């Protein structure tokens, strides 16, 4: 019997355009969206201040786009930083639009695009901040809002701050306040509990082919927990003990993750009772209780002995509520952001943003279109690589704009004004948290919201013009996105790999430069921090390499990225090996032949690939 023929698989860029993320419905974000932009616009219309309402609604809209699941502490940074950048962009664009002519303005916007684009390469929050800065620059320069720069920026911040207040500050009193606090803390507890569950699954996969995938899942769980806890404490004093306990629980997971990684590297099966202990710890985190007595694993190898010690310390932490007082993580400081912005990835992305932003403004001004700012603002969204492959972004943007314009035209034909526009803004803002699962859906919802804001501000409907400007922006971004820029393509991927290599080198140097065991507690804690940084940078590098591999196979996207996946895999194997070396050195004070041979092989292969890699000379340190 002949085998059934396989269906031909879709190209990655087309598969991305046709797929959507599957996530639980964020009912809290939906409610916050409904209570943000629409009510602010309605209040401004009642006060006969439409320009202020439009600016505030824009601030609330952008904040709603960034209102993703996670702890309230992390939301301050994730929502607040882009909001401040957007307010600055609105003020700068207003001043530039008032003082610059049709020739100077596109050049000025291109220069701003170069700087903001380069900074955007530093990470997700920096990307959101750079995008908001440039989009609001274009809006400030071209939108007919009769208000000074400072007033526009202040109203924008009020809108974003109101959304942030709904999430982070405003709490009902009494029983409802306690219920809300519990729900807010549940996401953070779930993130930390997921770390213990991921460690348990990694232990179960030790000695099997699933170990690598389980270690990658552990890295993702640690990243999510780190983001959830990495912000200011915003709750009442009564909950501070619970917060300290949660921080301590996260810290206690780091040596367990180190031991589990070393065991997976060794490839030997682990007794099942070890994973059972981890799951009891996960349940204790979720419930805020105690795990009870934990069965001790065997102590036949250094990694098993480390696991036993880490389980003992975790049990003491949960029973006594030990507060280690800090998260073992490093925030990217200004020096790291500057290095990324000036590196290959920052330069390449900054140049593409500058060309798209400046060219969009120049073409739009030559067309003498009343809403010329749509073109550069749309180009800024389209050029963002974190929204998927380039052709996928263009297809989704075009389809979403056509759908959103059609929905707005149909709705505005029978809705009364201005109540109809307020209703559309309210409904669209409530749908944004659901629409962020797919770029086309998000574009459609935002298109309805923006067109409704325009009509509420006294402008005539312009759905057809919105479609035309979007299609023109798609053409500009497609052209610029495939230009062979100086230095070759793939600069973003190479920059992420270089950051990951530097982090791996720092971890390798920390582990091998210490002469003898036993290591101090401070030395171990520093190693956990460096290890976390290395794995986090590697995860970002692999994501960038995967995105580059999914692009349309044209020269502008294939040169400079060949072999990036293999390099990322080698760096991950190196960090895994260094983790095993750290456990071995802590236990015996020396490395086995197996450790040194694996390190030598990995470093030689990395050096042979002509990538920035850790120095092989460090092998002489032990």
Image (tube, helix red, strand yellow):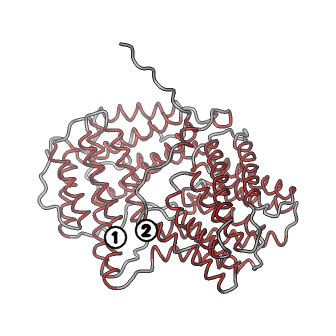
The 10 Å Cα crowd at callout 1, few under 14, some 14 to 19, many 20 or more, is few
The 10 Å Cα crowd at callout 2, few under 14, some 14 to 19, many 20 or more, is some
State which tag comes first along the sequence, 2 or 1: 2
The one nearer the camera, 325 or 552, is: 552
Q: Position of residue 34 (x, y in %)?
A: 52, 71
Mark 2, residue position = 28
Q: Which mark is residue 525?
A: none
* Residue in view at x 15 percent, y 47 percent: 273
Please count the marks in the image: 2
Dot 1: what SS? Answer: helix
Which residue is at the far front? 414
**Residue 87 as seen in the image, left or right of residue 333:** right
* Residue in view at x 75 percent, y 47 percent: 476
Q: Position of residue 543 (x, y in %)?
A: 50, 45
Q: Quadrant of the N terminus?
A: top left
**Residue 354 as seen in the image, left or right of residue 186:** right
Please say if the residues under marks 2 and 1 sit with CB atoms less than 8 Å apart: yes
* Residue in view at x 36 percent, y 67 percent: 326
**Residue 155 as seen in the image, left or right of residue 312:** right
* Residue in view at x 39 percent, y 56 percent: 529
Q: Position of residue 284 (x, y in %)?
A: 21, 62
Mark 1, residue position = 183
The one nearer the camera, 606 or 523, is: 606
User: Residue 380 occupies which quadrant of the picture?
Assistant: bottom right
Q: Quadrant of the C terminus?
A: top left
Image height check: is 120 above or below 595? below
User: Residue 180 occupies which quadrant of the picture?
Assistant: bottom left
Q: Position of residue 544 (x, y in %)?
A: 54, 44
Give the Cα distance between marks 2 and 1. 10 Å
Image height check: is 450 above or below 351? below
Between circles 2 and 1, the one closer to the viewer is: 2
Dot 2: what SS? Answer: helix
């Amino acid at each position: 019997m002949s085998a059934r023929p396989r269906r031909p698989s879709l190209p990655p860029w087309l598969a991305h355009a046709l797929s959507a993320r599957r996530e639980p419905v964020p009912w809290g974000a939906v409610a916050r969206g409904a209570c943000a932009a629409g009510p602010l616009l309605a209040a401004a219309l009642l006060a006969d201040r439409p320009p202020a309402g439009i600016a505030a609604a824009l601030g609330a809209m952008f904040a709603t786009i960034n209102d993703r699941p996670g702890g309230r502490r992390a939301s301050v940074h994730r929502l607040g930083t882009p909001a401040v950048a957007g307010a600055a962009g609105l003020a700068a664009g207003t001043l530039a639009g008032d003082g610059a002519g049709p020739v100077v303005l596109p050049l000025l916007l291109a220069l701003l695009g170069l700087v903001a684009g380069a900074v955007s390469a530093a990470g997700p929050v920096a990307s959101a901040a750079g995008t908001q800065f440039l989009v609001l620059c274009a809006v400030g320069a071209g939108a007919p809002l009769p208000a000074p720069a400072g007033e526009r920026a202040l109203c924008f911040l009020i809108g974003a701050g109101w959304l942030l207040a709904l999430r982070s500050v405003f709490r009902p009193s009494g029983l409802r306040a306690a219920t809300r606090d519990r729900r807010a803390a549940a996401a953070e507890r779930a993130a930390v509990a997921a770390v213990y569950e991921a460690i348990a699954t990694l232990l179960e996969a030790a000695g099997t082919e699933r170990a690598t995938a389980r270690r990658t899942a552990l890295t993702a769980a640690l990243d999510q927990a780190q983001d959830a806890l990495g912000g200011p404490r915003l709750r009442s004093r009564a909950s501070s003990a619970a917060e300290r306990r949660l921080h301590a629980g996260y810290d206690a997971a780091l040596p367990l993750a180190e031991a589990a990684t070393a065991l997976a590297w060794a490839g030997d099966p682990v007794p099942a009772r070890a994973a059972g202990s981890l799951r009891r710890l996960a349940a204790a985190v979720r419930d805020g209780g105690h795990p009870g007595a934990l069965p001790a694993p065997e102590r036949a190898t250094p990694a098993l002995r480390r696991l036993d010690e880490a389980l003992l310390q975790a049990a003491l932490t949960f029973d006594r509520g030990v507060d280690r007082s800090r998260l073992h993580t490093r925030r990217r400081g200004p020096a790291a952001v500057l290095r990324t912005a000036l590196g290959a990835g920052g330069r390449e992305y900054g140049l593409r943003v500058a060309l798209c932003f400046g060219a969009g403004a120049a073409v739009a001004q030559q067309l003498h279109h009343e809403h010329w700012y749509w073109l550069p603002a749309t180009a800024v969204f389209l050029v963002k690589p974190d929204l998927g492959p380039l052709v996928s972004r263009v297809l989704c943007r075009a389809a979403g704009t056509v759908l959103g314009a059609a929905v707005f035209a149909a709705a505005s034909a029978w809705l009364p004004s201005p109540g109809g526009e307020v209703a559309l803004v309210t409904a669209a803002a409530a749908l944004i948290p659901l629409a962020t699962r797919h770029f086309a859906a998000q574009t459609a919802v935002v298109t309805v919201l923006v067109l409704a804001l325009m009509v509420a501000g006294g402008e005539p409907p312009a759905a057809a013009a919105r479609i035309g400007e979007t299609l023109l922006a798609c053409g500009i971004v497609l052209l610029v996105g495939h230009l062979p820029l100086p230095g070759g393509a793939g600069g973003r991927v190479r920059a992420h790999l270089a950051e990951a290599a530097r982090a791996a080198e720092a971890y390798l140097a920390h582990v091998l430069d210490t002469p003898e065991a036993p290591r101090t507690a401070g030395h171990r804690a520093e190693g956990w921090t460096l290890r976390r940084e290395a794995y986090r940078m590697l995860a970002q590098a692999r994501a960038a390499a995967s995105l580059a591999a999914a692009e349309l196979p044209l020269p502008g996207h294939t040169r400079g990225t060949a072999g990036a996946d293999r390099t990322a895999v080698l760096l991950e194997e190196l960090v895994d090996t260094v983790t095993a070396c750290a456990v071995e050195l802590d236990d015996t004070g020396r490395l086995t032949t197996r450790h040194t041979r694996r390190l030598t092989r990995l470093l030689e292969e990395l050096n042979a690939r002509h990538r920035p890699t850790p120095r092989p000379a460090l092998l002489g340190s032990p």
